[in-house]
Amino acid sequence: MSPFAEKRFNVWFILVIATTVAFIANGIRLSYGVFTIPLEEAFSLTRSQAVLPYALSMIVGGVAQPFAGILMDARGPRRAIVISVVLLALGFIAAALAQNLWQLTLGYGLLTGVASSGLAVTAFSLLITRWFKQQRGRALGLAIAGIPLGILVFSPLTAILISSFGWQDTFLILAAVILLVVFPISWFFVREPDETGNVATKMSTKGLFFNKEVWQAIKAKPYWILIVKYFGCGFSAVLISGHLPAIALEHGFSAQQGATALGLLGAGGAVGVVLGGWASDHIGRYKTLVISYLTRALGLFLLAFFVQDLASFYVFSLIAGIPVLLSVSVTHLIIYDIFGAGIAGRMMGLTFLVHQVGAMIGPYFGGWIFELNGSYMLALVIGGVTLLISAFWGWRLQNVAQRYISTRVSS
């Protein structure tokens, strides 16, 4: 029996714990862009090669996401979170020990990629929706805010560590933080409602991954709209996060200023996801989703054409970052609403897989464009255009989803 079986955890305590885990683990995981230039110099790489480990981690995370969804549907997200924390630390240790590009790519890419499947928005979405019966959008927004706030803190901190200790020791220091801080918090305090005497949302444990319910959801039109718009979301998000410190160098700013801009990208995400959680509860999830994509597109166009000085670079990075995780968190709430609690984890995983395909292509594409033109302008424009396309499909999704939900409920 769980030692927590006779205790009733307050839902707000669980929210604080979830936010803390998201803050540290994802803040460290998503600060890879700060390593791009040091790795490029250490291994004599091209720009696209330097982001290859990050790109691989994105697609591996996408492939692992549906399988993590099976575990989360059947057992809840706690196990996935704890296992992922350990794998994340191992991935950073592997990166520190790498002697060439392929060791770095496989060690970092595979381990942190699998880890991301249990530390991304899906796990926290399911944890929060199981604990909160009301105000889910607001609660999820607060929990997910930990991710961009982590980027705000750990991006400049990572840059300082690299300048002081070198990139290899920095990987090891961050791995130690994960094992000594995040793992104990996850192990002792991330809990399911049914472990603590609270009433849990009933989750489906019937059948294999592709049971009848999942097959019907995959064949439905809302799923296909979701994956089309989600591709552009992932493509643009990781294009910018993987290259923003390098974009700073293109404009004549320092590596530390580039890391600060990446942190501001995260700060914008924290503001956006909290405001977006409130907005999704008040003006609706679909309107919030469309606004988020349009704002992100604006930020990329501003970075492409209107950077004049460091202040404008910081402001435009902030604008580009405000809606990034809002787009993901609102999408997960929409998936939960459309497909129901029983298969929510699997459907989040299957849609997020396509998001991660875009996330894999984005950073490599950005590096390739830079190598061709010596500039990131075209890559930023293409990223903005993909977000406009995602906004269109987000707008189309509402009516299609409502028809599907009415059909599913009536049947």
Image (cartoon, rainbow, N blue to C red):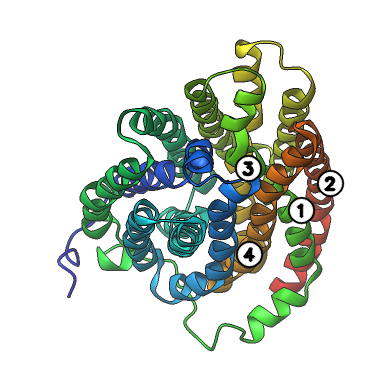
Q: What residue type is labelled 1?
A: Lys
Task: Point out residue 404 in the picture as x, y percentages from the top left corner.
Answer: 77, 67
Q: Which comes sooner in the sequence, label 3 or label 4?
A: 3
Q: Quadrant of residue 199?
A: bottom left
Task: Point out residue 202 in the picture as x, y percentages from the top left corner.
Answer: 45, 72
Point out the image quarter for the C terminus: bottom right
Q: Is residue 95 above or below residue 289?
A: below
Reading the image, the residue beneath label 2 is 389
Of the two numbered discs 3 and 4 in the rendering, the one whose residue sits closer to the viewer? 3
Q: Measuring 77% from the left and 77% from the top, which residue is drawn there?
A: 219
Of the two numbered discs 3 and 2 in the rendering, the one whose residue sits closer to the viewer? 3
Task: Point out residue 92 in the picture as x, y percentages from the top left corner.
Answer: 37, 53
Reading the image, the residue beneath label 4 is 353
Q: Which comes sooner in the sequence, label 1 or label 3?
A: 3
Q: Which comes sooner in the sequence, label 4 or label 2?
A: 4
Judging depth in this view, the residue of 161 and 346 nearest the camera is: 161
Q: Is residue 122 above or below residue 18?
A: below
Residue at the farthest front position: 44
Reading the image, the residue beneath label 1 is 229
Of the two numbered discs 1 and 3 in the rendering, the one whose residue sits closer to the viewer? 3
Q: What residue type is labelled 2?
A: Ile
Q: Quadrant of residue 130?
A: bottom left
Q: Distance between the residues labelled 1 and 2?
A: 7 Å
Q: Quadrant of residue 56?
A: bottom right
Q: Which comes sooner in the sequence, label 1 or label 2?
A: 1
Judging depth in this view, the residue of 378 and 299 nearest the camera is: 378
Q: Distance between the residues labelled 1 and 3?
A: 27 Å
Q: What residue type is labelled 3?
A: Arg
Tag 2's secondary structure? helix
Reading the image, the residue beneath label 3 is 47
